[in-house]
Image: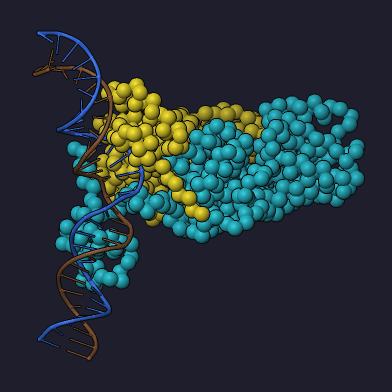
Chain colours: A cyan, B yellow, C brown, D blue
Amino acid sequence: MKHDKNVTIADVAKHAGISKSTVSQYLNKRFEYMGEETKQRIRQSIAALGYSPNVLARSLKQKKTFTIGMIVANILHGFSTQVIRTVEDACNEQDIHVIVCNTDEDPQKEQKYVQMLEAKQVDGFIIFPAGDNEELYRELLDKNIPLVFVDRIVPDLPVNTVLTDNEKAAAMAVDYFTNCGHRRIGLAVPPLKRVMTPRSERLSGFQKAMESHELEKSGMFIYEQSLSAMADYLSAEFQKEDKPTALLASNDLTLIEVLQFCRQQEMEIGRDVSIISIDDMPLAGVYNPAVTSIEQPAAAIGEKAAELLFEEMNEGKELSPAVHRYSPVFLERDSVETR
Amino acid sequence: MKHDKNVTIADVAKHAGISKSTVSQYLNKRFEYMGEETKQRIRQSIAALGYSPNVLARSLKQKKTFTIGMIVANILHGFSTQVIRTVEDACNEQDIHVIVCNTDEDPQKEQKYVQMLEAKQVDGFIIFPAGDNEELYRELLDKNIPLVFVDRIVPDLPVNTVLTDNEKAAAMAVDYFTNCGHRRIGLAVPPLKRVMTPRSERLSGFQKAMESHELEKSGMFIYEQSLSAMADYLSAEFQKEDKPTALLASNDLTLIEVLQFCRQQEMEIGRDVSIISIDDMPLAGVYNPAVTSIEQPAAAIGEKAAELLFEEMNEGKELSPAVHRYSPVFLERDSVETR
DNA sequence: GTCGTTTTTGAAACCGCTTACTAAAAAGGG
DNA sequence: CCCTTTTTAGTAAGCGGTTTCAAAAACGAC
């Protein structure tokens, strides 16, 4: 009993004894040239038939889908999820839909998704670039498709980009550690294979801050390692005599490994090693001790990204795309001990 | 310089010196009645023009959008996110897109989203029902739109539903606690205003299990409270003489509050109170001590939901919709102490 | 060479809605 | 009262594909 009784605009028109175009005018709120009685009748017919317009047909004609594509490199990061949420909220206010895709850092997947979404005629893209897809991005620009990057900078491409001030985030941590008397500070960071803006900027920010405290020669420890090997690696490194008293986890996923390392070495956080994390995790604030964290301004970033995209969608390409950085927020808690 | 040079199938046809319909046949892989040379030419023209079909137009004609709508009641639960991920993966394999919407438990929002997605002609819905929208769901059924519920049961509606075996989850916790010698056990649970399947089932599962251990009269403590007031409420309750030695957090968000409560009361987990959580959080395994958790089988649930939906989409409505329950997984860690 | 088949291709309608453009009706003015 | 204007409503041509169905071409066999 497939009762596909799809009511169309023609049905409404017939029911109201009026023409399609007039109904269409009504739907698009172009009441100017329309009698009050006509409006009335249309309203009734629509209600009577339970009509709702087919967005597909509208989009086909108008060449606008009121849908944007959002492509995220790594949805496992809480930060990504938060930005997605904010963007979705901003879009909902404008009755715009969001299709979210996760590339797992795979440029191939990214390309596939972009093409799928393009075929679906999305009106714009917000992308956390997986990297190494410059040609793909350039095509989007050539086709004049609105585009905003988030979290990562793609060099030499005139695209609005909005991200955390990562150098500042690292500097905040270093400054706090030194204020608490720490002179030997480590950074745990996942591999910097491709140019991953946040990682490399946090690293450089870390280095610069250490230099400004004149700690870069003997007080700086950089632990660059894959997440799966991080805990063991740290365990090994901390057997050495030459080790830091404070450790900065460069993101949420790294923090998990750092805490794992503390557990397996039975190190007490604070007493044996002080810790700060970039990214605030749900349980960090109630951890034992609560983990001092540097929160990324996900809401500000998401809002700005949406705003920039909407501008491009409404007013055409921005004249001069820029990089927009937002300051992280320092959440002082109990995982750093003065020495 | 809006160079909207949208290549259409007509352009390809012209370029190849052939008719639209033949190109269309080619695109749909109906090669049977098509000369090798024709195929060749089409292939070349497509490449030369960089053509890619407009999915909108196709969908309009075919009345299929290869897109499903996923409506989640509360995206703050890690469980929701995991299910979304699994569903997305399953869909990608079939080149189906997913549009995710978050209702924040608001039936109004849910209705709005369903209607938007319907207007967009999605091929099916996976819904975490916010509740109290029976009429809306019934309309979907009447229109013969494929529909699967996740996480929550809507009574009296012939719809496939897949969720965690929540009673079992609660029972697992109670059994473990009692095995460890606990005779006074509490349950922290958010308010049970509407019928929220997981909450109420976890509560009833808890009660039944307690009964089976003959602990329901004097050993059972139920702390039903909103999340924002939970920590203070527990603090107050634990001042009393009559309090449990073990506490079950009914979900991830509740666990945060429970841990918060432990911190502010400076209670040591294990020694002062044993804890189990339903839902496994990212940091739970490296918490101090690691929190014994009962993980919901999100992957199994997501896969099954997708599978059921695909069946309905391909073969029409299932003959006899059913409720599919999946067993949670007990993760024994260190937050329960024997007494 | 004619005719019957089998392959291959093309014309045209259609999906549901928008949007000029046009025609009709109503109103206004001299 | 007739001719302009102004309102209001209707016609028809797309948007970019799919799909039906008939026509053309190719191929043999007689």
Side of A211 relative to B308 (left or right):
right
Query: Residue at point 55% right, 47% down?
Result: A141
Vertically, is B245 above or below A296?
Answer: above
Check the picture and name the quadrant holding the N terminus of chain A.
top left
Horizontal side of residue B40 vs A140, given as left or right: left
Residue A310 can be seen in this image: no
Rendered location of residue B160, percent (x, y): 33, 35
What residue sits 52% from the left and 57% below the top? Answer: A316
The location of residue B218, given as percent across then percent down, is 52, 41
**Picture residue at 50% right of the left edge, 46% below the top:** A143
Task: Pick the residue in front: D22 or B98.
Answer: D22
Residue at x-position 17% and y-position 57%: A14
Q: Split into 4 quadrants, where in the image is the C terminus of chain A?
A: top right
Out of B97 and B2, give the one closest to the viewer. B2
- For residue B152, what is the image quadrant? top left
- Give residue A123's position: percent from left, percent from top: 46, 50
Q: Is residue A148 left or right of residue A270?
A: left
Q: Is residue A326 visible?
A: yes
Front residue (pair B78, A115): A115
User: Where is residue B18 shown, x and y percent of the image?
Assistant: 32, 33
Relative to B35, does residue B72 appear above or below in the rendering? below
| Residue A22 in the figure: left or right of residue A192 | left
Q: Disc count in the image?
A: 0
